[in-house]
Image: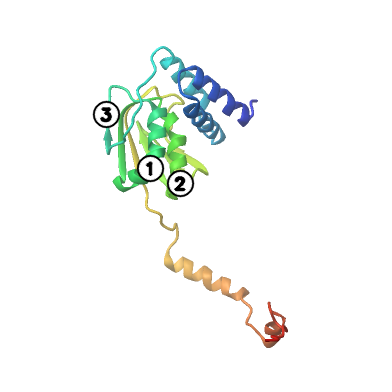
Amino acid sequence: MQSLSEIDTTSKRASKAAGFSWGIAEEIGKAIRNLELFGLPGIINLNLYLKKIKKKHPEKLKKIEKENKNKELCPIYCGVAFLDQCKHLETLRTIKFYNINYPMLILPFVSKASEILGKKILIQYNKSSFLVNFNKSILSKNIETQIVTLANEISIVFLENKNSFSDQEWKEIYKLSEETFVEESESLKTKGAGAGLTDND
């Protein structure tokens, strides 16, 4: 079994050999490492995509709009642009990409953006959905196949942070926690930080 370090390094070198700059290749290496770490098929999708673009390198996507259309979009360049522009894109709430190749490859870039923004982000394409949690995990649902060569539409939604519990549940557990509080006594005051020091001024 290959280590995460080997996956990172080999993905980076293969991406450079396929025409990406060293800077982008570095990002790809980290992205594929994260996909594999989260149990998602990064190597399979990257390998197929690099074969596809070996003879004709894709165009960069410089600016992301609320809706992004092209004959075919590169998941790597879309992912890098998304990461670079995420603070602005958050204000749009929902972003859509149309005709994006190997959409699995955009996930780790969105996951990293989730960490930067401190917000969960929902990604949906075909019948699959992925919830990225601050670059700590990717929760997936309804993955029909490990390989999707082209997604007609990808929806990316910035979610508002909210508790998974009610105010009442919080009050109840907080009240229980109060039983561990210790009232300050005179003996504790004399033993506290700075106690017993004499001011000579």
Tell me: 156 left or right of 36.
Answer: left
In the rendering, which numbered label is found on residue 86? 1
3 in relation to 87, above or below:
above
Q: Nearer the viewer, residue 201 or 158?
A: 201
The amino acid on which the numbered mark 1 sits, given as a three-letter code, is Cys
Against 160, residue 176 (above or below) is: below
Tell me the kind of residue under disc 2: Ile
155 above or below 193? above
Q: Which image quadrant is residue 74 in?
A: top left
Callout 2: SS: helix
In this rendering, which labeled residue sits more in front, label 1 or label 3? 1
N-terminal label among 1 and 3: 3
For marks 2 and 3, give the CA distance.
26 Å
Q: Residues within 10 Å of mark 3 (few under 14, many from 20)?
A: some
Residue sitting at x 54%, y 36%: 38
For the N terminus, the quadrant is: top right
| Image location of residue 199, percent across then percent down | 69, 85
Q: Which residue was labeled with disc 2?
A: 116
Circle 1 SS class:
helix
Pick the front one: 97 or 25: 25
Of mark 2 and mark 3, the one earlier in the sequence is: 3
Mark 3 = which residue? 69
- Front of the two marks 2 and 3: 2
Colouring style: rainbow
Disc 1 crowd, CA 10 A, few/some/many (<14, 14-19, 20+)? some
Quadrant where the C terminus lies? Answer: bottom right
Q: How many neighbours does mark 2 have within 10 angstroms: few (below 14), some (14-19), or many (20 or more)? A: some
Furthest toward the front, the residue is 201
Task: Mark 2 and mark 1 in contact? Answer it, CB < 8 Å.
Answer: yes
Locate residue 25, reporting x and y percent: 50, 26
